[in-house]
Image: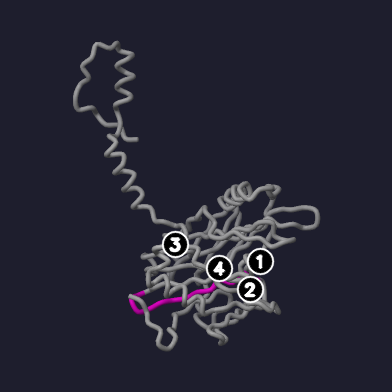
Amino acid sequence: MTRQTLQHPIKTSLGIAALLIVSTALVGSPPEASSEAKKDKAEKQPRIGPPTAEELADKRMQFMKRALARYTIHVGDRKKTAKVGDPCLRWTNPLHNALDGIISVYTHKGGRPAALGVFFRQTKTRWANEFAIIAESDVTIMRSGRLFWKPSEYVCKFTDLPRSPLPATSSVLRLAQMRAIAADFSAIDYFGPKKIKQDLRLLRQPLYRYSEKGTILDGALFVFVVATDPECCLLLEAYQDGTSSRYRYAFAPMSVYQLEVRHKDKLVWSIERRDARGANCRSYYAGTYTPEPGEELPK
C-alpha cells in the first residue's frame, strides 16, 4: 500500500506512543483511492477464464462455436468420433493480429483430448482455424462429412516426469501438484520470419481436466501464451501402471513457429518452424477459414 503524507497535524494530548499508534492507523491510501487502484488494476489484467454466459451468447462467439462444431475428429478404429465441447478459453493477441479467438477441446466422453481446435478473427472479413493434435496416431479430421485434413506426423508424446511425486488421493490436491509441476516448465516461441525470441507465459489455471478409467487417474491441459493467445500446450497426467502411479507430461504445438520447452532449465522438447499451410500441414494445421455456402461472417 502506498504511504501518503497527512494534510493536517493531529492535535491531541495523547502520549508519544499513542500518537504513533494513531498515526500508523491513519496513514495510507484513502478508501476511495484504494478502491480506484483496485479497479484500475482489475481493468488492466486480461480475463483468462472460460467465457461468461454473455460472451457465449454474442454473435462472434456463436459463429466460432458453430464453425468448430462442423469438424469431427476420427482416431484409429474407434467407432465414435471426438466432438467439440464448449470453448474453454476466449483469448486475444493484438500484437500478432489475432483480434478475437477461442480454443475448444475435442474428446471422447471426457477423456484425454484427441485434438484442440483454435478459431480466431484476423480482420473484419478474415478468420483462421487451427488444430493441435494430441492423439498419438491415425487421426482424420472431417468437416461437414468431408475429408478436411489428415496429419502426416504426430509429435505429442508422453514422458515420465523425473522424480515424480506420488499423485495425491484427492482431485483438489492433485490440482495443486500439477500446478506446481507445470510451473517448473518454461517455453520459448521464435516468432515470425526473423525468429524473434518470445518467452511464453504459463496460465496457471488448466483449461481442461480429464480422466480415463483404469489408466489416467487425472489429467490437466495447461497452455503457454502470448497475451492470452495459446502458443504451446502442456498435458500433465497422473497415470496408473500396474500397482504404482506417477506423473507424465507431453507437449503439442499451437503455433507454426519454432518452439522450445525446458524443465528446470533442461531442454526437454522442441519443434522446428513449419512453413506449410492448409492440406500441406504435417503435425499442426493452420489455415484461413472458408465459409460454408450462405454462411454469414459476423462483424
Which range is magenta?
A: 123-135
Residue 47 lies in what quarter of the image?
bottom left
Residue named by callout 1 = 157
Q: Secondary structure at mark 1?
A: loop
Q: Amino acid at mark 1?
A: Lys
Q: Secondary structure at mark 2?
A: loop
Residue named by callout 3 = 51
Camera-side residue: 59 or 122? Answer: 59
Camera-side residue: 285 or 139? Answer: 139
Residue under the image location 54 percent in, 56 percent down: 206
Q: Amino acid at mark 3?
A: Pro
**Residue 24 x %, y %:** 33, 24
Give the crowd class for mark 4: few <14, some 14-19, many >=20 residues within 10 Å: many
Residue named by callout 2 = 154
What is the quadrant of the N terminus in the image? top left
Decide which of tag 4 and tag 3 comes sooner along the chain.
3
What is the quadrant of the C terminus in the image? bottom left
Q: Secondary structure at mark 3?
A: loop
Residue named by callout 4 = 105
Residue 14 lies in what quarter of the image?
top left
Q: Nearer the viewer, mark 1 or mark 4?
A: 4
Q: Amino acid at mark 4?
A: Val
